[in-house]
């Protein structure tokens, strides 16, 4: 598969999720994801107007053939074809990609595309929604998406959406998220260990109320409903923790997972005006070796 690894233009950003990444227009952002289906997973990206991209992907346990994917693609396309005024193939896509653009009665464009990885162990379907500006832009966006699409094969994979940029080992599985105005939260599981990640926007406003970053982080974690076993505090300029008196043997959640150790990091980027706070609840010292160097910075 061809892949353009150049940096996105100012009008674009790179979206990375669940082991893949690609480039989309800068105002397309994550609005929904669903990992509940073991057979396939789904994400949606939206702009200020509405849904722009729907993506469904699967990693089958056994390799699948192109004929099966083409049949599924025709089934999806057939549902649209009955409503469309016309359709045309998208030219200039990388090898292995197939794409069509449908013109709807209200002149909106719908682009559909699929790609099957050469080994047959990953396939993806896209639906891209466009206003009635003509098929040229729809084709350009789809070609850019397809040529920039790649599967991440590094030991640490990236998660990129909004202003969030995080790298974690590929076997850290996303379990929960909460993306709110000013705060983004992600929880990952790895063999009963848990990795918590927060990113807070408008850090200047946060620190105006409590100027000491580490004191602020300790206070936040001590009031966090997700974390009950340890108490956090500042010592030697760093974020530390110790067992709470009411849990001398550990909180029941720690006991159930046999994870009694807590690693923490917090740092402030004044240029980007965010605060990142990370907590790793782990079992043995060697677990810390799994964390990439990009994660280990901070206080």
Image: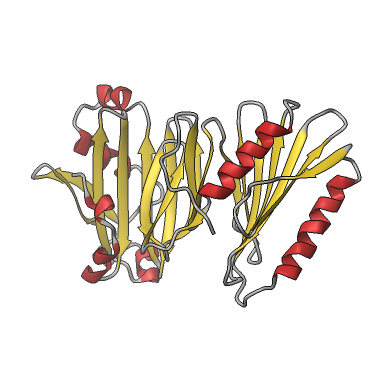
Q: Nearer the viewer, residue 283 or 36?
A: 36
* x and y percentages locating residue 251 in the rendered image: 34, 62
Q: Is residue 79 above or below residue 11?
A: below
Q: Residue at x 26, y 26 (%)?
A: 207
Q: Nearer the viewer, residue 68 or 250?
A: 68
Q: Is residue 283 above or below residue 198?
A: below
Q: Residue at x 35, y 69 (%)?
A: 255
Q: Nearer the viewer, residue 229 or 159?
A: 159
Q: Residue furthest bottom?
A: 62
Q: Residue at x 65, y 54 (%)?
A: 56
* x and y percentages locating residue 258 in the rendered image: 34, 71
Q: Nearer the viewer, residue 244 or 74?
A: 74
88 with respect to 137 (left or right): right
Tell me which corner region of the image, top left, top right, bottom left or bottom right, holds residue 127.
top right
* x and y percentages locating residue 45 in the rendered image: 60, 40
Q: Residue at x 72, y 65 (%)?
A: 69
* x and y percentages locating residue 291 in the rendered image: 28, 60
């Amino acid at each position: 598969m061809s892949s353009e690894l150049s940096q996105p233009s100012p009008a674009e950003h790179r979206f990375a999720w669940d082991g893949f990444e690609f480039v989309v227009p800068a105002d397309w952002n994550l609005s929904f994801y669903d990992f509940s289906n073991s057979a396939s997973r789904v994400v949606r990206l939206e702009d200020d107007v509405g849904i722009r991209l729907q993506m469904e992907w699967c990693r089958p346990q056994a390799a699948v053939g192109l004929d099966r994917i083409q049949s599924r693609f025709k089934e999806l396309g057939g549902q649209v074809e009955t409503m469309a005024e016309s359709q045309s193939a998208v030219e200039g896509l990388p090898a292995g990609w197939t794409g069509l653009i449908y013109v709807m009665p209200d002149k909106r464009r719908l682009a559909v595309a699929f790609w099957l990885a050469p080994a047959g162990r990953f396939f993806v379907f896209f639906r891209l929604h466009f206003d009635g500006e003509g098929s040229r832009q729809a084709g350009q966006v789809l070609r850019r998406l397809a040529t920039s699409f790649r599967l991440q094969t590094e030991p640490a994979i990236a998660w990129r959406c909004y202003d969030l940029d995080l790298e974690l080992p590929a076997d850290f599985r996303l379990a929960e998220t909460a993306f709110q105005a000013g705060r983004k939260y992600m929880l990952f599981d790895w063999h009963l260990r848990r990795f918590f990640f927060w990113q807070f926007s408008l850090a200047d406003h946060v620190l105006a109320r409590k100027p000491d970053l580490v004191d602020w982080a300790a206070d936040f974690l001590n009031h966090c409903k997700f974390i009950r076993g340890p108490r956090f505090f500042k010592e030697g300029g760093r974020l530390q923790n110790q067992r709470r008196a009411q849990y001398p043997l550990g909180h029941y959640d720690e006991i159930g997972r046999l994870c009694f150790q807590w690693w923490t990091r917090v740092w402030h980027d004044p240029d980007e005006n965010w605060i990142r706070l990370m907590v790793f609840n782990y079992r043995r010292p060697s677990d810390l070796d799994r964390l990439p160097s990009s994660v280990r910075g901070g206080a």
